[in-house]
Image (cartoon, rainbow, N blue to C red):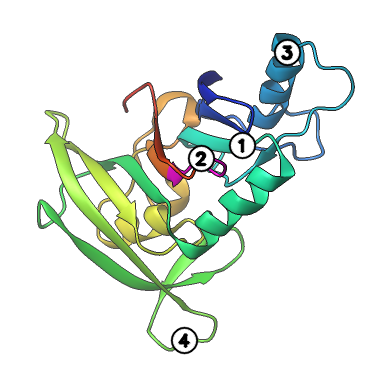
């Protein structure tokens, strides 16, 4: 875990691949547990530490996770996430190359048994999923690095839509990738998050320290 930002109201961390965002009720470590331990040691806090994730990213993915350090900050930040006023930018390393260097993907997704399935419009339970992508670079090994901005926030949306477009994320076996990524991870990163600070109301951006 790497701390990107901390004040009395927020903590932003750069989550590594293959680490849970929040405790799962098992013995497995999580970013939240590491962050709470950091606060407890850094500020010599007795007792329990209040720290709640404002959003989550997949265990196999990496990048920015924002935590609230107070209940007031949590409620205000959760509202920003809910109403879409925050700005999330992702990066994905995919197999092949998209037909255009930038564009919009729109599909209808169904959440089915820990997987998002592309369905026909009007299918029972299907929800519209839209994202914008931009090519950042192509690599000699045939991979492309994409920048992605979500317009909707569906379950596994980026993973499902890119796979449906013929460019699965490297390492994402669940969505058809046949190429491994490091340590069984998926080459997907929450690269940056812009919010309004819950107290000062000023815009603030948190950026991941590493690249895919």
Tell me which label, 4 or 2, sits earlier in the chain: 4
Q: Nearer the viewer, mark 1 or mark 2?
A: 2
Q: Position of residue 133 (x, y in %)?
A: 23, 53
The disc placed on residue 200 is: 2
Quadrant in the rendering for residue 193: top left
Q: Is disc 4 in contact with disc 1, using a CB cutoff of under 8 Å?
A: no
Tell me which label, 2 or 3, sits earlier in the chain: 3
The disc placed on residue 43 is: 3
> Which of the two residues, 115 or 51, is positioned nearer the viewer here?
51
Confirm whether the magenta stretch covers residue 198: yes
Kindly report the distance in space between the C-alpha atoms of the residues bearing marks 3 and 4: 52 Å
On-image quarter of the N terminus = top right
Q: Secondary structure at mark 4?
A: loop
Q: Position of residue 83 (x, y in %)?
A: 49, 64
Q: Nearer the viewer, mark 1 or mark 3?
A: 3
Kindly report the distance in space between the C-alpha atoms of the residues bearing marks 1 and 3: 17 Å
Kindly report the distance in space between the C-alpha atoms of the residues bearing marks 1 and 2: 17 Å
What residue is shown with label 1? Answer: 67
Q: Sort mark 1 into few (<14), some (14-19) or many (20+) by Cα contacts within 10 Å.
A: many
Q: Secondary structure at mark 2?
A: loop
Task: Determine whether 56 is above or below 161 in the image.
Answer: above
Q: Secondary structure at mark 1?
A: strand
Task: Please report the residue visible at 48 percent of the width from the left and 56 percent of the height from the top.
Answer: 156
Q: Is residue 177 visible?
A: no
On-image quarter of the C terminus = top left
The disc placed on residue 123 is: 4
């Amino acid at each position: 875990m790497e701390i990107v930002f901390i004040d009395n109201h927020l903590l932003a961390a750069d989550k590594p691949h293959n680490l849970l965002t929040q405790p799962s009720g098992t013995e497995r470590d999580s970013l939240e547990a590491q962050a709470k331990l950091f606060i407890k040691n850094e500020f010599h806090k007795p007792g329990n530490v209040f720290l709640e994730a404002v959003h989550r990213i997949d265990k196999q993915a990496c990048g920015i996770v924002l935590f609230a350090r107070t209940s007031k900050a949590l409620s205000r930040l959760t509202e920003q996430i809910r109403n879409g006023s925050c700005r999330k930018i992702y990066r994905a390393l995919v197999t092949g190359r998209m037909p255009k260097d930038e564009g919009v993907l729109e599909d209808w997704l169904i959440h089915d048994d820990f997987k998002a399935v592309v369905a026909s419009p009007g299918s029972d339970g299907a929800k519209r999923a839209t994202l914008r992508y931009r090519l950042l670079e192509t690599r000699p090994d045939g991979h492309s690095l994409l920048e992605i901005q979500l317009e909707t926030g569906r379950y596994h949306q980026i993973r499902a839509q890119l796979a449906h477009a013929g460019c699965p994320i490297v390492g994402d076996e669940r969505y058809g990738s046949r190429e491994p990524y490091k340590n069984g991870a998926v080459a997907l990163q929450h690269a940056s998050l812009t919010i309004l600070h819950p107290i000062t109301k000023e815009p603030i951006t948190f950026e991941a320290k590493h690249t895919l």
